[in-house]
Amino acid sequence: MLHRFAIYPIVFMISIAVGGAQAAPAITGVANAASYQGPGLQASGIAQGSIFTVFGTGLGPALCSQTAATPLQTSMCGVSLTVTVNGTSTAPYPLGVYYGQQINAILPSNTPTGSGTITVTYNNQTSAAYSIQVANAAFGAFTPSGSGYGQASVTDLNGNLNTIIHPLHPGDWGTLWGTGLGPISGSDATQPPVANVGNPTVYVGNTALTLVSGLQYAGRSYYFPGLDQVNFQVPQGVQGCYVPIAVQTNGEVGNIGTIAVSPAGQNTCSDSIMGQDLVNQLASGSTVKFGYVRMERNANTFLLVDREGDQAYASFSTYSPQTAFLVEYGVSPGYCVTNQFGSPTISDPAFAAVLDAGSTLNLVGPYPLLVPWNASSGAPGYYAMRMSESAGGYILNGQKYTASGPSGTNVGFFSVAVTTPASISGLPQFSNLAEEQTIPRNGDFTIRWTGGDPTMQNGNVTIGGFSASVTPSLFNSFQCTAPVAAGSFTIPGWVLSALPPSQEYPINGVKVPLGYIWLGQYSTPVEFTATGLDRGIFTDVFFIGFLISFQ
């Protein structure tokens, strides 16, 4: 597994890597070391003075370790890097080499901005030049999981990591850790100066904070080169286990993480689908083992998508107080998050999905029977299945479906059934959108709906969407949760701006936009028990959506 930065608590790590060395360096990717924003997305450039990551093969030795003492050097263990922009070359400061497949390094602040290249030299062999974009600022927030999404690396004034069992409260001060605020004056190899860097905007919930209002400091950490900290005050009225937080630099928003915020006097947050009792159990110091099974039905009418997007997921996870940051399910009501890595409908904490419930789970319904779904490769305890009419299975309304597991190493036999909504017409329906409508990405956009069931999903709706292009290959998605009774919700422009423009693509001879937006409600979960679990739940959701062009 490749090493990714994780700040929890704040430790600047120069790690030891073991594994087989490669003969000739070859670069396959370069990204911000915190966000891993894909090239072409907003804030995906490598900022002057930031920590970045190089991926590839043969990038270094099988074993490389170094202390974090300053001044940092421009080579370590026979590895050095060169960045060239507009004919000017600079030498980044390597922080660690991992398995010969990854290098973390700091880009000197005096590197020119613009299109350039990077090379890696190891044992006097230099890789082919790899194209990069150097930006003045492009902030990425660290996450404790090291994935670039989910719970953000935020600490309170005592240095405690913010999680669902260590929430912040309105009026509290927190520190968001990341990299990419911009260049500093002087050397990046030594202890950095304490001074604000740039003029970022920080979004906490739906509130924009700046150095004029709500931010105390946004600059380098005093102790560690390349590491940025943003000291912010939680706005009044913010609440939820999964409240979005993001930083905008030079008009571009980086990865959007979440923080946990509770009302004054409350020591845990209260809207996790695990249930308040299990959150309290986790807060008491105990381990929690949780199973989550769901079905998704895209109940649209567009002929190219209908009955081709039904899916089923299951994750069986174990959480400890130390890994509470992995309890990441969706987004709290009233807010939106983005995720360039996977489904926006609700997050599956794959990092915590480690409980073996058997090699194959079964999902059975009316004719035709749904095919079994298998453990996802590389993630024991995580199961995923995509269904289609042509493959012999899809989800119907008003029908009973039974999910079962045969018993695995960690989770015993279980069988649980749900009955899907009797009528699709009872679900919330868009009232101001049409097929292939254009939604601008440069401002807020209000969607409206009619209908919905106030008894489902705690009286909320889920809004999801994605946008993609083929050339270049870009993808990003978003998810929002809102009260169904409101009948409308405004997706913030800073969320929509994180999407790439929707490209048209021919499907079955018809050009359609590679964008989609949907609206639905999760059914009330059905609980199930199994040996090895504190609780399991099974839920389903029917989404009604449209192909959309995000521009």
Image (cartoon, grey):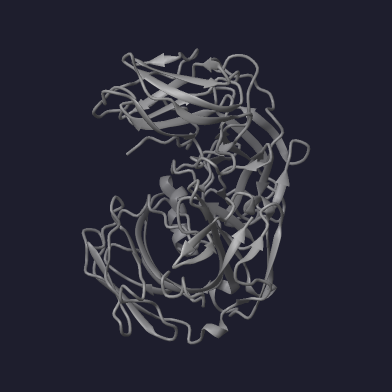
Q: Quadrant of the C terminus?
A: bottom right
Q: Quadrant of the N terminus?
A: top left
- Seen from the viewer's position, the closer of residues 507 and 410 is 507
Residue 260 visible, this orientation: no
Rendered location of residue 520, percent (x, y): 55, 72
Image side of residue 453 versus residue 318, left or right = right
User: Is 87 located above or below residue 56 in the figure?
Assistant: above
- Seen from the viewer's position, the closer of residues 190 and 134 is 134
Count of numbered labels shown in the rendering: 0
Image side of residue 467 versus residue 316, left or right = right
Rendered location of residue 401, percent (x, y): 35, 80
Residue displayed at 48% across by 51% down:
470
- In terms of image quadrants, where is residue 460? bottom right
User: Is 20 located above or below residue 445 in the figure?
Assistant: above
Rendered location of residue 195, percent (x, y): 68, 23
User: Is 128 located above or below residue 398 in the figure?
Assistant: above
Residue displayed at 67% across by 47% down:
203
Residue displayed at 39% across by 25% down:
128
Instruction: Farthest residue to the front: give it.
Output: 509
Residue displayed at 40% across by 78% down:
395
Image side of residue 156 versus residue 415, left or right = right
- In terms of image quadrants, where is residue 414? bottom left
- Seen from the viewer's position, the closer of residues 241 and 199 is 199
Rendered location of residue 55, percent (x, y): 39, 33
- Seen from the viewer's position, the closer of residues 239 and 504 is 504
Residue 470 visible, this orientation: yes
